[in-house]
């Protein structure tokens, strides 16, 4: 059974829309944890559009499940990560003009930068994951970087329908198989929701799915506790 990491970035997005103190993503993390989340994920972006350093610091002090910090290979946020020591750091691509992360980190084209970031984080005692597209070359480069895990970008799968979605799922399965052969922990996320999560959760040896927007959107309607419990129930293996 895949574990559930709940991304609470969009709770902070609502807060920052008014530049105020509510809703507090730290409170949201507590509610998610009490509802059964196996981890809490936040993305400390360079432009600080939603999660703030204050949030990461308080989450590090209060979260009892796995704390996963997403960040770019940028000196300032790498220093923060090494100081606050989340359980896991996931390196992701980042562009200021994007609404959300639009694709996987190009490890092939940025081998040295990624390797240096991985080395810095691992020296601080942090498990490192790379958010990558389900492409064999990227999986191989991730393994060579000395990262311990990958998170497969599921955005193309989530947006596809019909036979195209089946083809995208096949790409995820094949990339996952290669990752496990290379000794990498297998995670996945981006765009997953209550309708499409099942087949991804059923991929062999899938360790963790990180899901944010869909859970936060449902929580607006039914509350964080119910939204997390409903998603958690969907991660059971399909029989």
Image (spheres, grey):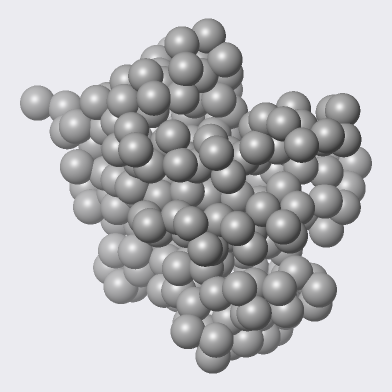
Q: Residue at x 74, y 60 (%)?
A: 53
Identify the image quadrant of residue 201. top left
Rendering quarter of residue 182: bottom left
Residue 180 on image: x %, y %: 29, 63
Residue 228 seen from this side: yes
Q: Residue at x 53, y 63 (%)?
A: 60
Measured as percent of width and height from the top left, residue 11 is found at: 65, 32
Can residue 163 be spotted in the picture? no
Quarter holding the C terminus is: top left
Does residue 98 appear left or right of residue 149 in this picture? right
Q: Residue furthest left?
A: 239
Q: Does residue 107 sit above or below 102 in this rendering? A: below
Q: Considering depth in this image, is 64 or 82 the residue closer to the camera?
A: 64
Residue sitting at 68 percent across and 61 percent down?
71
In the figure, 225 relative to 20: above or below?
A: above
Residue 75 or 228: which is nearer the viewer?
228
The image shows residue 82 at horizontal and vertical percentages of 63, 80
* In the displayed structure image, the side of residue 101 where residue 139 appears, left or right: left
Extreme bottom residue here? 123
Whether 19 is drawn above or below 65: the answer is: above
């Amino acid at each position: 059974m895949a574990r559930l990491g709940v991304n609470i970035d969009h709770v902070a997005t609502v807060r920052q829309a008014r530049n105020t103190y509510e809703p507090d993503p730290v409170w949201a993390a507590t509610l998610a944890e009490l509802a059964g989340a196996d981890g809490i994920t936040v993305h400390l972006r360079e432009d600080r559009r939603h999660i703030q350093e204050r949030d990461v610091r308080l989450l590090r002090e209060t979260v009892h499940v796995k704390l996963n910090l997403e960040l770019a290979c940028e000196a300032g946020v790498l220093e923060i990560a090494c100081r606050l020591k989340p359980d896991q750091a996931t390196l992701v691509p980042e562009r200021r003009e994007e609404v959300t992360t639009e694709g996987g980190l190009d490890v092939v084209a940025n081998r040295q930068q990624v390797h240096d970031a991985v080395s810095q984080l691992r020296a601080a005692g942090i498990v490192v994951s790379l958010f990558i597209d389900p492409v064999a070359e990227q999986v191989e480069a991730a393994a060579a970087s000395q990262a311990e895990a990958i998170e497969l970008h599921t955005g193309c799968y989530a947006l596809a329908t019909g036979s195209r979605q089946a083809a995208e799922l096949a790409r995820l399965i094949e990339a996952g198989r290669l990752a496990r052969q290379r000794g990498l922990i297998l995670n996945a996320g981006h765009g997953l929701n209550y309708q499409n999560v099942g087949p991804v959760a059923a991929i062999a040896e899938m360790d963790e799915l990180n899901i944010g927007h869909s859970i936060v959107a449902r929580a607006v309607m039914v509350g964080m506790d119910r939204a997390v419990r409903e998603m958690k129930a969907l991660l059971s293996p399909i029989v």
